Image (cartoon, rainbow, N blue to C red):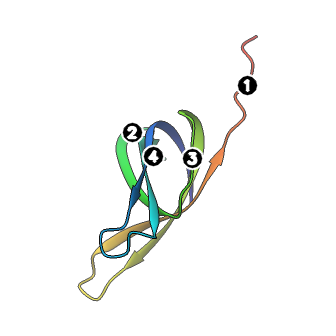
Amino acid sequence: MRFPFELTSSRVIQGRKDPSRSFTIIEGLCTLPDNKRVFMEALLTDRQHFAPGHYAVEIALDTDRQRRLTAFVRGLHPVQQKAAA
């Protein structure tokens, strides 16, 4: 599933157990299908750099053994903004 996402900040951190691994934390506002906007924070593997702006976030949903719903970010894709007429 893809949702509109407004990235407000991103930062890179190192792993605690394995300092050679890097992760990227992204934060922003995600627009759900019912037009509600919710705050979202996600941990991405590897070192990635993103500029604040509009993106499309690709999310996969899964359930675990305790039937808890978990969302995984599969990708963050830049979106072309339409020029104002």
Q: CA distance from mark 1 to mark 3?
A: 23 Å
Please name which of the two marks, 3 or 4, marks the residue nearer to the observer: 3
Depth check: give the residue in front, 42 or 22. 22
Q: CA distance from mark 1 to mark 2?
A: 22 Å
Mark 4 residue type: Leu
Q: Position of residue 52 (x, y in %)?
A: 53, 33
Read off the residue under disc 3.
Answer: 49
Q: Position of residue 78 (x, y in %)?
A: 66, 43
Q: CA distance from mark 3 to mark 2?
A: 27 Å
Q: Earlier in the sequence, mark 1 or mark 3?
A: 3
Q: Estimate how packed mark 3 is, as few (under 14), some (14 to 19) or many (20 or more) residues with alpha carbons within 10 Å.
A: few
Read off the residue under disc 4.
Answer: 32
Q: Quadrant of the N terminus?
A: bottom right
Mark 1 residue type: Lys
Q: Is residue 29 above or below residue 2?
A: above
Q: Secondary structure at mark 2?
A: loop
Which image quadrant is residue 69 in? bottom left
Mark 3 residue type: His
Q: CA distance from mark 1 to mark 4?
A: 20 Å
Q: Which mark is residue 36?
A: 2
Give the residue at x 58% y 35%: 54
Q: Which mark is residue 82?
A: 1
Q: Earlier in the sequence, mark 3 or mark 2?
A: 2
Q: CA distance from mark 2 to mark 4?
A: 5 Å
Q: Secondary structure at mark 4?
A: loop
The residue at the far top in this view is: 85
Q: Earlier in the sequence, mark 3 or mark 4?
A: 4
Give yes or no for contact between labels 2 and 4 (Cβ–Cβ under 8 Å).
Answer: yes
Give yes or no for contact between labels 3 and 2 (Cβ–Cβ under 8 Å).
Answer: no
Q: Quadrant of the C terminus?
A: top right
Give the residue at x 37% y 48%: 40
